[in-house]
Structure formats: structure tokens, C-alpha cells
């Protein structure tokens, strides 16, 4: 890539962002689009536009994002989102403070040397990128005293990271504690999850087993238990019933619309009862679906009774009358054997993955290691095509491999765009295929909660990103371009890889710019969700439920967003000293991300769970991992360029490991469990234990007719026989 192409790519990315921002300003001001751009506010009963639409400044969203407080974020999107902004602010602070020194000291130090002029052909850019090579360590002569500035800079970046990440850990710990000390009643604070129940003794039921065990240990505070059941069949019936209800709502909406259009009696919808509604008897849809709902309701009630009586499994939720006891139980050893009576904190009711609750202890361990092996194999598998893509998606290589494209790619406009974006776009698209697969792998480990699955998938995605993007692109691109040199002199591989780092910085600068200008431009403008919403509303949606489903935004998607951010901080840290010019691009990425996502958190995204900051230890671990990789990279690079004082860097990774160990010992336990001093805070009202208990009953097992005496009697009988309640 030539320097002109590099500048063109940045300019094009900036223009795209401006266009997308103007589109957002225009489209978000239209009332018909409010549900796409302000769903979070609408769901909370607030007006979409603060101060009214007519007087609204087109750039008011920037002022609102900048003026919003941490408490505003918590009120609108919860603690987890506030913690994410602590992460963004911390990383931004690391890059800004590091950049102040590195840009002012290292850029003049590098630009005033002349190594590139002396040996232009030896750089990986081979003289085609001299303007940026002059601003990197590639322009510093081997063993030069100027390298002292770069060596000291390694420690400066490390020190800044230690200080700011320590402050962030304390801040997030305080946020978590304040949330858990809230006087508001939270059902999960009064419950624990019990897995690995031992076999039931003859003459005893599951409920009797669980109740007697916990009553003997907590005689004064035990409330009741909810034994997990096999809900596969009842879930299927319930889903079918819900499907008929949606069809009925849609049919009634169509009928009402026909009345509004001028026909006083309306046209009653009809459908065929055969395969996919294409054949069979023609019937009145409203009557047909009402009859189906009546039959399915009866079938559901019958299956609920069978499930409650006969399909109990080896796990339960146990409820206590105060949250101190629940916190104490969740962090105590209840049985002599590790694979019996495993008690942990209960997730929120909406987070429970019911099918994973009954997986046995050793089966979970075996599954976990099998998933680790699968992830490792997938990383290795993906490293091959990603390295190949990074090598062939340069314009020069494409012209060689696909000669028939020459007439197209040789056109000036097309050539400029392809040179600027092709490798980065190919990489981004390739990585987009991973998230669903990683979420699936995390779920089959046996993890009991949705938030934990997202944390696990996020970690796997991070390893994919770092190993396949940062390392894979560097190694793949270098090997492809220097294959003949390596074949002739195998011992030259390590020096070639090290010397390729400054040249590869240009690829990653463009990659980062593409991510924040185009990525955040699309995030803010919400063009794709807007188009999908209007198409679905015009051609598919009839009922209010269908319309809401069409515009409902979902959550902030931490499983992919956090690893993407981690990849950027890893790239920027690793190149911060080698090519300091990358730092402003990292700053722009996180600053723009903070601004745009602040707006989205306040107005768009609706959290799907609340884990009270449990993601932060994961974030901190990956920040430390990025720092460690940066220090090892610099240690190796200084060694390859034969700087005599390279051993001075050896303590850096050791200090990082020590710092991480201290942080983990000091803070981590409070994220695994709820501290008793936190749980002991008084509530503003006495908790309604029956409501807490019922909040954990799966939707498919909730009685259709709460007033039905016969069904209530069945629940009572089930309670006496000890299967569910």
C-alpha cells in the first residue's frame, strides 16, 4: 500500500462516517423512526426527544451523551453497561497518557534518524512506505543510543496501564457493591442454585430430600425449594400454544384492519388446515385458532401435572428468607465430596439455562476440556485461511493470481479503494462468522446462566482475534512475501518477522480506522435495523406484538463487542512504541466508541440480563494479557535489533504477572460471590417470598388458570409428593 492510498483510505473512511452521521441526524428526527432510534426510552415510558422535536439541535445527541452521568447509564441500561463504559474510559486514558509521552518523544526521535534512507530495500515495505517508516523504529539504526527512548517508553506504557487499571478495578468493585447493597428486592439474592444432587433414598422424594437437607443446616431461614424438571415436552406444547396465540392476534388485527377500511362487517380471514396452509379444509381463522388454543391449553395443563409429578431431575433452586443466608450458602462447602450438593449463586430468573442445570460435575469438567480442544483446533484451522487471506488480498497478489481482473482493478478509482480496504474488509467479514459458533461451544460446557455463557464466548473470541488477526496477519503476510528468502536461509525467519512489525503497522492502522469510522458510523445510523424494520412492518407485521418484535433492539452484544475492543487495544499497545503514529487512531476508536455507544446505551439498547459487573474481571484479565503480549513483543524486537540493554526489559512481563496476581487476590472474590457485609444491608420492605419463588418457575409450567381450584389442588398434591413446589 502506498502512502497516497493510505491517506485516501483514511479520508474515505472519514467521509463515510460524516455521511452516516448526517443520515442519523435526519432519520432519527422522523417520528416514524422513533422506535428504531429511541426504543430504550420508549420502553421506559419516556419521550424519545428531550425538549421536543421542533427545537432539537441536530447534534444534540453529542451534548446529551457528553453530559450524561454514570447514574444515568445505570438507570437506563444497568450496572453491566456502566462497567463497560468504565472499561472504555480506562483504555482511553491509557492510550491518551501513553500517547502524550510517546508521540512527543518517540516521533521526533525516529523521524530525525536516517536508517530507512540507508537501507530502504531491507524494510518490509521495500521503499513504498517510507513516509510512515520514518515515524517508526524501522528508521532507527541498530544498536543506536536513540533506542533508550523506546526502551523507557515500554515501561511508561506499562506504568500507566497498572495505575489506571487498578483505579478501574476499585471503581467497578464499588459499583457492584452499591448495586448489591440496594434496598430494592432482587429475587436472585434470596436464592441459590443446587446441582449434583445425590441419589434419592428409597421412600423419599426429591423435594423431601432437598428440603430436609437444607432445613437441617438453615432451620430458621430456609423457605422452600424448586426442583428442576425435564421440561422438554411441556416446553414444546407451550411454544405451540404461544404460536397459535400469535397467529390469533395477527388474524384479529387483519380483521380489524378490514373493518377500518370501510367494510362495516369486515372480512373474516380464512385459512386451510392442511400442510403449511396450502391444502385441506377452508376454515374461519379466528374460530379455528380459538379452538386450537382451547385444546392446547388443556393439553398443556395435563402435561404440566405429569411433568411436576414424574419428571424431577437432580438439581434445584433453594430459597431463603434473607439474603445474608443465601450469600453464605452460595460460598460454603456443603458436602464432603466435591461432586455432591454443589451450591452456587443463583442467576437472575431470565438468565437460567434450564437444560444445563442437571449436568453432573465430572461431565461438566469433561465437556469443558473437550470444548477447549475444539477451540484450539478451530483457532489452528482459522489461522491457515486468515493468514492466506491476509497474504492474497493485496492488490498486487490478486492481479497475479487472477489475471482476468486486471482490466477492472487497474482503473484508478477502483484500485485506490481496493488497496485501501480489501484486506481489512476480508478479515472483518471472516471474523463475523465466529460468534454464533463460540456461543454454542460455551453453552454446551454446561454453564448455567446466559451472562456466564457470554463471558465464556467473549474469552474464546478474544483468543481467536489475537492469535489469528494480530499474530496470523503478521506472520502470514510476512511469510508470503519472503518465502523465497526463508527457503534459502531458514535462520532468517525470526529477524524477518521482527523487522516486519513496523511495516505491518500500516495494515493495522487502516484496520482500526475502518473499524471506528465505518463501524461506529453504521452503529450510530442504524441503517440496517431501520430498513429491516420498515420492510417487516410493511409486508409482514400485522399485530402490535409483531411490530414490537420488528423494532426491538436487543442488548449491546458483549460477546462480540468486548473481544473486538480487546483486539484493538492489543494491536495499539503492541505497536505503540514500534510505530507510535498508531496511538491517535486507537484514541479515536475508543473516544468515538465511548460517544456513540453512550448514545446507544441511553436510547437504543435494552439489557437482556444484569450480572452486576461480572464481566469486569474478564476485561481486566484481557487488558493484562494485551499488556503482557506487548512487553514480550518489545523484548523480542529489541533483541532482534541487537540493542545491548535489552535485558532491562525482562522484569516488565514479570511485573505484569505480579500486578495481575495482586489484583486477582484483592478484588476477584467479591465478583465471584456477594460479600456478607454487602448482603447484610437492610431492605426498604419485607420481601414477598412467594413472588420471588414464582419468578423462577419456567414459563411453560406457570398455570394458565391461576384461579383453577383443580390445578391448584394438583400443585398442592405435587408439593406433598415432593416433585416441584
Image (spheres, rainbow, N blue to C red):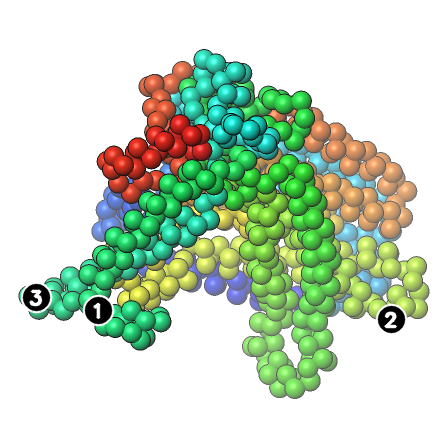
Q: Residue at x 38, y 52 (%)?
A: 237
Residues tagged 3 and 1 counted as in contact (Cβ below 8 A): no
Which one is in front in this view, the residue at disc 3 or the one at disc 1?
1
Q: Which residue is mark 2?
A: 484
Compare marks 3 and 2 and give the one earlier in the sequence. Answer: 3
Q: Residue at x 38, y 18 (%)?
A: 683
What is the spatial separation of the Cα atoms under label 3 and label 2, in whole angstroms?
82 Å
Q: Residue at x 89, y 48 (%)?
A: 642
Residues tagged 3 and 2 counted as in contact (Cβ below 8 A): no
Left or right for 521, reference 431: left
Viewer-closest of 287 and 141:
287
Mark linked to residue 283: 1
Left or right for 722, reference 121: left
Vertical relation: 246 (above or below) 600 = below
Mark linked to residue 265: 3
Horizontal and vertical percent position of residue 281:
25, 73
Compare marks 3 and 1 and give the one earlier in the sequence. Answer: 3
Viewer-closest of 434 and 133:
434
SS for dot 3:
loop
Vertical relation: 177 (above or below) 348 = above
Horizontal and vertical percent position of residue 489:
93, 65
Quarter in which the N terminus is drawn: bottom right
What is the spatial separation of the Cα atoms under label 1 and label 2, in whole angstroms?
75 Å
Amino acid at each position: 500500500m502506498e502512502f497516497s492510498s493510505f491517506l485516501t483510505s483514511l479520508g474515505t473512511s472519514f467521509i463515510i462516517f460524516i455521511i452516516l452521521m448526517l443520515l442519523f441526524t435526519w432519520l432519527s428526527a422522523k417520528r416514524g423512526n422513533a422506535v428504531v432510534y429511541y426504543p430504550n426510552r420508549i420502553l421506559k415510558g419516556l419521550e424519545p426527544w428531550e425538549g421536543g422535536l421542533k427545537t432539537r439541535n441536530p447534534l444534540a445527541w453529542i451534548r446529551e451523551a457528553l453530559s450524561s452521568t454514570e447514574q444515568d447509564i445505570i438507570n437506563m441500561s444497568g450496572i453491566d453497561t456502566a462497567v463497560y463504559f468504565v472499561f472504555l474510559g480506562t483504555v482511553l486514558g491509557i492510550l491518551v497518557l501513553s500517547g502524550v509521552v510517546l508521540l512527543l518523544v518517540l516521533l521526533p526521535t525516529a523521524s530525525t534518524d536516517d536508517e530507512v534512507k540507508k537501507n530502504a530495500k531491507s524494510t518490509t515495505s521495500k521503499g513504498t512506505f517510507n513516509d510512515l517508516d520514518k515515524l517508526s523504529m524501522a528508521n532507527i539504526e541498530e544498536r543506536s543510543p536513540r533506542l533508550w527512548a523506546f526502551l523507557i517508553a515500554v515501561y511508561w506504557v506499562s506504568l500507566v496501564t497498572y495505575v489506571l487499571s487498578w483505579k478501574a478495578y476499585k471503581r467497578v468493585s464499588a459499583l457492584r457493591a452499591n448495586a448489591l447493597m440496594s434496598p430494592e428486592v432482587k429475587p436472585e439474592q434470596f436464592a441459590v442454585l443446587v446441582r449434583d444432587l445425590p441419589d434419592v433414598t428409597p421412600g423419599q422424594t426429591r423435594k423431601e430430600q432437598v428440603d430436609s437437607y437444607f432445613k437441617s443446616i438453615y432451620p430458621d431461614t430456609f423457605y422452600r425449594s424448586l426442583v428442576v424438571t425435564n421440561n422438554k415436552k411441556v416446553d414444546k406444547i407451550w411454544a405451540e400454544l404461544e404460536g397459535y396465540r400469535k397467529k390469533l392476534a395477527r388474524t384479529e388485527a387483519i380483521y380489524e384492519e378490514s373493518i377500518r377500511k370501510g367494510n362495516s362487517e369486515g372480512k373474516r380471514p380464512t385459512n386451510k388446515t392442511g400442510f403449511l396452509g396450502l391444502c385441506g379444509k377452508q376454515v374461519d381463522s379466528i374460530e379455528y385458532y380459538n379452538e386450537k388454543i382451547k385444546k392446547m391449553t388443556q393439553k398443556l395443563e395435563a402435561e404440566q401435572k405429569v411433568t411436576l409429578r414424574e419428571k424431577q431431575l437432580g438439581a434445584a433452586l433453594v430459597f431463603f428468607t434473607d439474603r445474608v443466608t443465601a450469600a453464605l450458602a452460595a460460598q460454603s462447602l456443603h458436602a464432603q465430596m466435591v461432586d455432591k450438593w454443589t451450591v452456587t449463586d443463583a442467576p437472575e430468573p431470565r438468565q437460567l439455562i434450564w437444560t444445563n442445570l442437571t449436568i453432573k460435575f465430572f461431565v461438566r469438567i469433561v465437556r469443558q476440556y473437550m470444548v477447549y480442544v475444539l477451540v484450539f483446533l478451530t483457532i489452528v484451522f482459522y489461522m491457515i485461511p486468515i493468514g492466506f487471506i491476509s497474504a492474497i488480498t493485496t492488490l498486487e497478489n490478486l492481479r497475479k493470481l487472477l489475471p482476468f481482473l486486471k482490466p477492472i482493478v487497474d482503473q484508478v478509482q477502483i484500485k485506490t479503494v481496493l488497496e485501501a480496504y480489501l484486506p481489512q474488509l476480508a478479515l472483518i467479514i471472516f471474523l463475523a462468522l465466529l460468534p454464533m459458533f463460540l456461543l454454542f461451544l460455551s453453552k454446551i460446557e454446561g454453564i448455567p446462566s446466559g451472562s456466564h455463557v457470554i463471558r465464556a464466548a467473549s474469552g474464546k473470541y478474544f483468543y481467536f482475534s489475537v492469535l489469528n488477526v494480530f499474530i496470523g496477519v503478521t506472520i502470514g503476510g510476512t511469510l508470503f512475501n519472503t518465502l523465497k528468502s526463508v527457503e534459502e536461509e531458514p535462520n532468517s525467519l525470526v529477524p524477518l518477522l521482527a523487522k516486519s512489525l513496523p511495516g505491518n503497522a500500516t495494515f493495522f492502522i487502516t484496520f482500526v480506522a475502518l473499524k471506528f469510522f465505518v463501524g461506529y458510523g453504521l452503529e450510530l445510523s442504524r441503517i440496517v435495523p431501520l430498513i429491516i424494520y420498515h420492510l417487516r412492518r410493511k409486508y409482514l407485521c400485522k399485530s402490535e406484538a409483531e411490530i414490537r418484535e420488528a423494532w426491538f433492539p436487543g442488548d449491546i452484544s458483549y460477546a462480540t463487542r468486548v473481544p473486538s475492543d480487546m483486539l484493538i487495544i492489543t494491536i495499539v499497545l503492541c505497536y505503540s512504541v514500534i510505530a507510535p503514529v498508531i496511538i491517535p487512531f486507537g484514541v479515536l476508536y475508543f473516544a468515538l466508541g465511548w460517544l456513540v455507544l453512550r448514545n446507544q446505551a441511553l436510547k437504543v439498547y435494552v439489557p437482556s440480563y444484569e450480572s452486576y459487573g461480572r464481566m469486569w474481571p474478564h476485561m481486566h484479565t484481557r487488558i493484562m494479557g494485551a499488556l503482557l503480549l506487548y512487553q514480550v513483543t518489545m523484548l523480542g524486537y529489541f533483541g532482534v535489533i541487537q540493542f545491548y540493554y535489552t535485558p532491562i526489559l525482562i522484569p516488565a512481563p514479570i511485573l505484569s504477572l505480579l500486578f495481575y496476581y495482586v489484583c486477582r487476590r484483592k478484588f476477584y472474590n467479591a465478583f465471584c460471590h456477594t460479600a456478607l457485609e454487602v448482603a447484610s444491608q437492610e431492605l426498604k420492605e419485607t420481601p414477598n417470598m412467594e413472588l420471588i419463588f414464582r419468578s423462577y418457575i419456567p414459563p411453560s409450567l406457570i398455570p394458565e388458570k391461576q384461579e383453577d381450584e383443580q390445578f391448584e389442588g394438583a400443585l398442592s398434591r405435587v408439593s406433598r409428593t415432593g416433585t416441584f413446589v
